[in-house]
Image (spheres, rainbow, N blue to C red):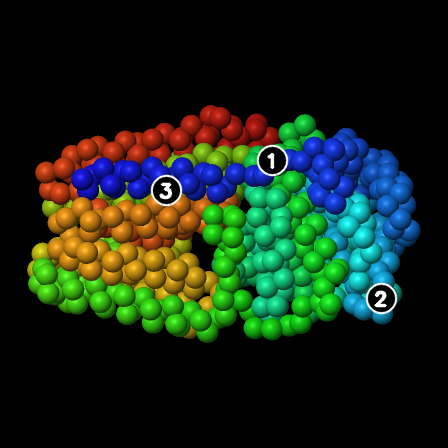
Amino acid sequence: MRLALLFGSLTLAFLLAVWTTQVPRPRPADAPVAAFSAARAMTDIEQIARAPHPVGSPEHARVRAYLTARMTQLGLSPQQQAGPLSPGSIQRLKKAGGDPDAADNQAINLIGVLPGEDRSQPAVMLMAHYDTVVGSPGAADDSTGVGAVLEAVRAIKARGPVARDLVVLLTDAEELNLDGARIFFGGHPLRDRIGAVVNLEARGGGGRAAMFETGRENGPTIDLFRRAAARADGGTTSTSLAVFMYERMPNGTDFTIPRDRGVGGLNLAFIGRPAQYHSPDAVPANLDQGGLQHIGSQALESADALLRAPALPAKGPNAVYADVFGRWMLSHSAATGWGLLGLTALFGGFAAWRARRATGLTAAQVGRGILDGLWFLTAGLVLAQAVRLLAGPMSSRAASSETYYVLLRRLPWMEAGAVLTVLALALLFLTGARLTRPRTTAGTVAVLTLLVLLIGGFSPIMLGAGVAAAALSLWPIKTPTSTWGGWLGLIALVFLLGCMTQAAAPEAALLFLWPALLAATAAALAALVAPDLTRPAGLIPPAVTGVLGGAWLMGIGHFIFLGIGMDLPGALAMIGLLALLYLRPLSPTLGATRPVLIGAAACLILACGLNLAARFAEPTPATAEALP
């Protein structure tokens, strides 16, 4: 029974996660005039992305002339704004083989205005960049953004007059150093009228578009976006965790410039199909039109809501939010997180009380469960990093930018390998097999840690994880494990992580708070109907939450990996730990561990094979230094 529920929950969770990460169907050219149509946007993208058009190239001038004509057709009365390229941009363009002298060392923005009924109100801006890197047609980055902006303007006009001005800014030289955005917000007469910005970007060739960045003090903006996203095709993919992470990364987009000036707004991008990022293959024929439909529909609904709102969103406390299966978006205040932790403690305490009465559960058994969870997390970090190195070096140690793009093309292989690695460790964890050979386990962890540090480069995180995992492997077992102790121990561990994160970074705490509350609810229900967990009724709550919570976590994990998985695949170990909140009570009985161990071994072998295969599927060009 447990084995069937375990594999059934995993399978259904995976299928549900795959469904939630699908893009919407692209709308045809004859879609309603007030709707966003990917087919209509593709007409512009096919013209814009005919060839690479970096700053200073003849194609760049052709694209600018084409866009000027299109903006005129849309009634935007376009104007040009020229400004100097920064010295760093000039050097970067020359190094890439471009010719900044042909552009007189200038960036040229295109600016248009769709007048609103009350022109005294703050304006809304739709922004994308029309330049590309040298060598890439840029069908996604950022011809998709430009084409989507033009189609959104057409749809907004079709919906009738708007309350305030819409400013369309197509920036230049974004790929060099965000120069176009700096030039506009550095001195254009319209800059001080901008009250909100919707920016469109891309890193890849498609997939679901995420709203990954906002202005500061975003609570009211998130309330508006939540309502707007409900009208978008395919809903949205967004979480305050992504905003928290992106703010601490060295990356930047055009949105960075107004955001640093205190302007609110939304930043949208898709990052799927990473092989197309800055690639010669980024042509219109290879563009994911479902991804175009998704980002364009979100941009349209967001801009339209801002344009027709009685007042633009004011600044307010940052919200905590995330989409649920890409179809709904839940949000709450940061302070509400403490209430969720209180509910988790209440439901977990009730489950512990019932389990103590039925099975004699002790605090020591719960403590053992906490240590087991720490072992999984630390060992998972090391194992995932070690398997990832089979696909090539960390991007921070890449020999050249060309090597970096090779690694990007290998990213889907790495992700599949990382998922299988964490799954293998989770299955091993559920059998308890590691507890029978503590010295072997500790030695294996120590060897893997050494390899990770020698090949992947020194990392205090990896060193600390390796030392902790080895020490926990040798921890003397004085208390027998129990199902309730292991389950509630994991809940207690995630609860503690949630408390620490809630105190330090409440926008990111939902990663712990929501899964912990769901698991504690399942534990309370199981304790109510079958406190000894020997009857099937007691296993139904964790099995059901395993499907729902597991699918949600897989979706979150997918976008986390696309963002940071190239260098930190062990981040999925945290997702695995959270999934174990639901799977731990489904651990196989002693006599049924053999098929689970076989499954774990098969997953690990396949993970290693996929990472090695990535080297052959996406080989390093002769012009790049050989990968270790």
Q: Label 2 belongs to which residue? A: 118
In percent of the image, x 51 and y 28: which residue is there? 619
598 above or below 21?
A: above
Q: Label 1 belongs to which residue? A: 25
Of mark 1 and mark 2, the one earlier in the sequence is 1
Secondary element at tag 1: loop
In percent of the image, x 82 and y 56: which residue is there? 161
In percent of the image, x 11 and y 46: which residue is there? 436
The image quadrant that residue 408 belongs to is top right
Quadrant (top left/top right/bottom left/bottom right) for the C terminus: top left
- How far is the residue under mark 2 from the one under mark 3? 50 Å
Secondary element at tag 2: loop
Of mark 2 and mark 3, the one earlier in the sequence is 3
Q: Is residue 96 visible?
A: no
Of mark 3 and mark 1, the one earlier in the sequence is 3
Q: Position of residue 60 (x, y in %)?
A: 82, 39
The local crowd at label 1, few if under 14, some if 14 to 19, many if 20 or more residues have their Cα within 10 Å, is some
Please give left or right for residue 91 compared with residue 462 in the image. right
The local crowd at label 2, few if under 14, some if 14 to 19, many if 20 or more residues have their Cα within 10 Å, is few
Secondary element at tag 3: helix
Q: Position of residue 135 (x, y in %)?
A: 71, 34
Q: Position of residue 446 (x, y in %)?
A: 25, 48
Please give left or right for residue 36 compared with residue 339 in the image. right
Q: Position of residue 437 (x, y in %)?
A: 13, 45
User: Residue 13, which numbered label?
Assistant: 3
Which residue occupies the foreground of this view, 98 or 319?
319
Q: Is residue 197 visible?
A: yes
- How far is the residue under mark 3 from the one under mark 1? 23 Å
